């Protein structure tokens, strides 16, 4: 299922993206993650960020979580499940935070559909109310 078919990052949905930049320590932690890497590290920026958060941030519970939305769970015209992998999942005060790391984050609104689909997938699998699931896209400079 995860090797073919529509992907969350390339599926567009009609919505009003909330791309308000927020103050968050995440950007500072990313700087710390990169500064703590050995110069000869072969890790990708994604691997560096995900590993750092998983080891050093007590709210991060998993990385690269595979998710899917069945065609019957969405109003989108798809015949196969929509799949994706969530970079970071955090649990804070009984709320779920879905974080997507984009090293070259120039247009955060371009990722709004992907985040909405991730939110829908988590909501469907966990029966968590929508208002308890939050999404953000970020890099070392910004958090939206």
Image (cartoon, grey):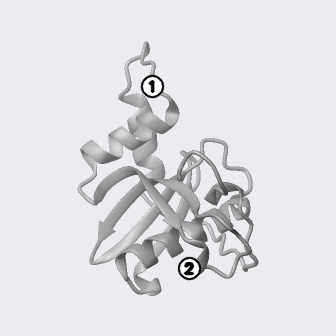
Relative side of 22 to 53, left or right: right
Q: Is residue 138 above or below residue 12?
A: above
Kind of element beneath mark 2:
helix
Question: Residue at coordinates 28% horizontally, 60% vertically from top-left?
Answer: 59
Percent of width and height locating residue 136: 53, 64
The residue carrying pointer 1 sits among few (fewer than 14), some (14 to 19) or many (20 or more) residues within 10 Å by Cα, namely: few
Disc 1 target residue: 43
Contact between labelled residues 2 and 1, with CB atoms less than 8 Å apart:
no
Q: Name the residue located 28 percent from the left edge and 56 percent from the top edge.
A: 61
Q: Is residue 22 above or below residue 105?
A: below
Foreground residue among 24 and 93: 93
Specify whether residue 138 is in view.
Answer: yes
Can you give x and y, in whole percent of width and height, for residue 7 in the image?
64, 56
Which residue is at the front of the view, 5 or 137?
A: 5
Q: Nearer the viewer, residue 16 or 78?
A: 78
Residue, x 68% and y 82% (percent of image)? 75
Query: Which residue is denoted by mark 2 in the rendering?
Result: 73
Report whether 77 appears left or right of 47: right
State which quadrant residue 65 falls in.
bottom left
Observer-side mark, 1 or 2, equals 2
Regarding residue 22, the answer to whether it shows in the image is no
* Number of the label disc, if any, that sits on residue 128: none
Q: Position of residue 121 (x, y in %)?
A: 49, 70
């Amino acid at each position: 299922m995860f090797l073919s078919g529509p992907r969350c990052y390339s599926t567009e949905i009609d919505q009003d993206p909330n791309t308000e930049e927020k103050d968050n320590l995440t950007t500072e932690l990313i700087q710390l993650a990169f500064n703590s890497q050995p110069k000869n590290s072969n890790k990708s920026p994604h691997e560096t960020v995900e590993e750092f958060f998983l080891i050093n941030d007590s709210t991060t519970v998993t990385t690269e979580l595979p998710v899917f939305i069945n065609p019957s769970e969405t109003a989108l015209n798809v015949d196969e499940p929509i799949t994706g992998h969530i970079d970071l999942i955090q649990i804070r005060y009984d709320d779920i935070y879905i974080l997507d790391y984009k090293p070259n984050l120039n247009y955060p609104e371009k990722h709004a559909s992907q985040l909405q689909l991730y939110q829908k997938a988590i909501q469907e699998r966990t029966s968590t109310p929508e208002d308890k699931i939050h999404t953000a896209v970020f890099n070392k400079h910004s958090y939206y």
